[in-house]
Amino acid sequence: MMRIVAAVIFSLYLVLVESGSPGARETKVGSKAFTESVILGEIVTQLIAGSGVKAIHRSQLGGTRILWEALKAGEIDVYPEYTGTLTNEILARHRFETDKQQKEFLIGLGLQLGPRIGFNNTYALAVTESTSLGLGLYSISDLTAHPDLSFGFSNEFMDRQDGWPGLKAAYLLSQKDIFGLDHDLAYRGLVAEGIDVTDVYSTDAEIKYYNLTVLEDDKQYFPTYNAILIYRTEWADKYPELVKMLSALDGGINESEMATMNAAVKIEKQTEEEVARTFLLEKHGRESDRSSRGMSVRVLANTLDHLALVGISLLAAILIAIPLGIVAAQNPRLGHLVLTVVGIVQTIPSLAMFVFMIPLVGIGGPPAILALFLYSLLPIVRNTHAGLKNITSDILEAADVMGLSVRARLQLVELPIAMPTILAGIKTSAVINVGTATLGALVGAGGYGQPILTGIRLDDLSLILSGAIPAAALALAVQGCFELWERYMTYRGSDRGPQDVGF
Amino acid sequence: MLNLRKVCKFYGAVGVLSDISFDVPRGATGVIIGPSGCGKTTLVRLIMGLISADQGEVMFDDEAVVEENISRIRRRIGYVVQGGALFPHLTAWRNVGLMPKYFGWSSPEIVQRVELLADMMELPLGALHRYPGELSGGQRQRVSLMRALVLDPEVLILDEPFGALDPMVRFQLQEHLRALFRKLKKTVVMVTHDIAEAAFFADEIILMRAGKVVQRGSIFELLSNPKDDFVTAFIKAQRTLAEDSQEL
């Protein structure tokens, strides 16, 4: 069932949105949702594009897990990863003793490691200069003497095997005041003295910019995070010339060069495209010609993407949820099951949902649409069920004794009477959908979430607003349209207006 | 026309209807009456096939009513549920015209029939385009009757048709309907708890108590030859103007 629905939605999506042919010569490069990864992804993309093979940069996908699933599913061909992340996070449960074992395991997955880029972007803890001088903090061990300090860590660091849980154990840290926040917001928190200590990447542009003190990892807890390209064997076999070309990157960027490029984007506000182009021109003497789009074109493209995400998922949800609601109303046992299942689906966190969808339908629009479709089911199923169940038995008996068939009774009496309630459910789904669709950017689905994601990463308020304002406006517009429609659909003299039965 | 033979209905071990027999001849009006909870509504629901009898049988035009023929027989019966049960999402016009349209009548035929019924029931034409929620109680009741009459059924079954109406409207509608039923020669089964109403309509009154028929007959038979004290008490439980004036 799931797969059929997925297939239907996917084909719908292909017809409406995508127009590329799958057999074409092209390379899909992925990158994570932080600046350094986007810059590396962009460098790889431009390098490949310069060779004449079409290169698509699926930039700033949600997180390690999404990139990894996308690579395994063949949705991307190559992306920049870090050796520490690979060993301690992605493959942690396999506990490989040697690099050789790990390499063989990757080969088994159809993957292989490419050139090391040359820098080690390891985790580190940082404090402001005044905190460092005031408390005499120079190494992580020094923290043990100050149990009152508050720690603000990026969410990923909080959860990672090689992040906070391991660090705490290794240094016997006893601080209690610890919370998770977005990595880019952590710097602001640090400067505003909302937090005292945060995790940083050693190539972060902000370390220099905010004049932070990086605490020495005196117990050498953090593993090395050498930047490295990882790609699919299938792709490498198809494009040996590209593999050879990428080997030019081997050792090509050291830590300070990477930090400078990060600063160029985050502080000097250059685009990743420009920074990558400058890098390739200066270091490799290559011209590349990727042009970035203007603001209005971008907003329009985001709007179209967003409407496609919301429209397709909502349409599919209406087509499936109303019959499900009818079945649920007619058969109490099955109804209970249906309502329970769609209720459980609703509780799956959206990021987890996207990760589940990738092996099924890849990255980009389809996983976002499938996830939005699933989230849209509950309000519609529940309202359809409630709308039908709320019809009093005398009305149904009147229809029966008049001689209407079961089907005719449903069409002519029950559904029209329940329609205002059903419509209220569709409205709820639509409005929630517009908001949730912004998360689609995490799996590369585009839409208004794209500028929000980039804006958060670059600490660029106007970029965030260029996604957030249209998203809010769209939600209001959708709400308004449905209210007009409801007014039209609600019969005069009705004692019960459209009701949302809620959650 | 409508004939019940020793009909019984149980809910679990409790008998809600026991040994009910009566006969309503073609063109006659039978009124089922009794105190609240005596099983009147259960009985009409059983006649309509909405619930089935545990024993005995319901005969319609000399044919036993069973699962297989119920939908065919229902088309020959017009049923007015207690409270009217008009479809709230349809105008009065569409409530009445729903079944003709379902059976494929042409538009002019439907228009003609609905207008004729509105005229017959003295419903203003303007009210036809209102939704049930916008109609007065009397208008709603008229529309329910029109809906029951639209396919020109031989038998009408009316459950408390004047239940929620104010006395003036009730009085007028009673007068009007009795004349109409006689003119159209309808066989009528009516449920009420009002003995005056029963006396006014009935060729035969079927007086029920606790799921049983206590006595059947015309109002005069019930008055002159009551079967037990309950019959007398039930008939006498009416306030007349004369009595009230004396008390004053």
Image: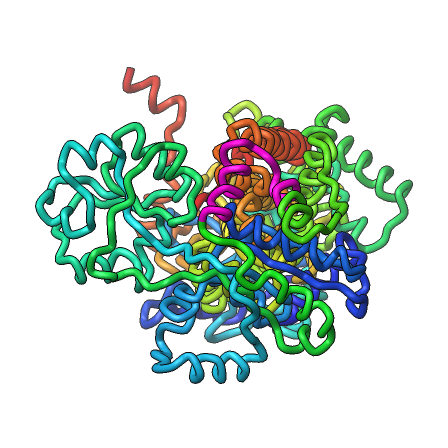
Vertical side of A241 occupied by A435: above or below? above
Tell me the residue at 51%/79% (across/down).
A106
**Image quarter for residue A344?**
bottom left
Vertical side of B180 occupied by A383: above or below? below
**Residue A427, can we see it?**
no
Q: Is B228 left, or right, of A269 in this rendering?
A: left
For this rendering, which residue is in front, A83 or A468?
Answer: A83
Q: Is B18 left, or right, of B157 in this rendering?
A: left
Which residues make up the magenta segment? Answer: A256-276
Q: Quadrant of the N terminus of chain A?
A: bottom right
| Residue B178, percent from left and from top | 65, 38
| Residue A244, percent from left and from top | 68, 70
- Is residue A452 covered in magenta? no
Give the residue furthest to the left.
A145
For this rendering, which residue is in front, B69 or A431?
Answer: A431
Tell me the residue at 73%/75% (across/down).
A238
- Is residue A267 covered in magenta? yes
Give the residue furthest to the top.
B248
| Residue A166, percent from left and from top | 24, 62
Q: Main secondary structure of the magenta part?
A: helix
Tell me the residue at 81%/36% (across/down).
B116
**Residue A49, can we see it?**
yes
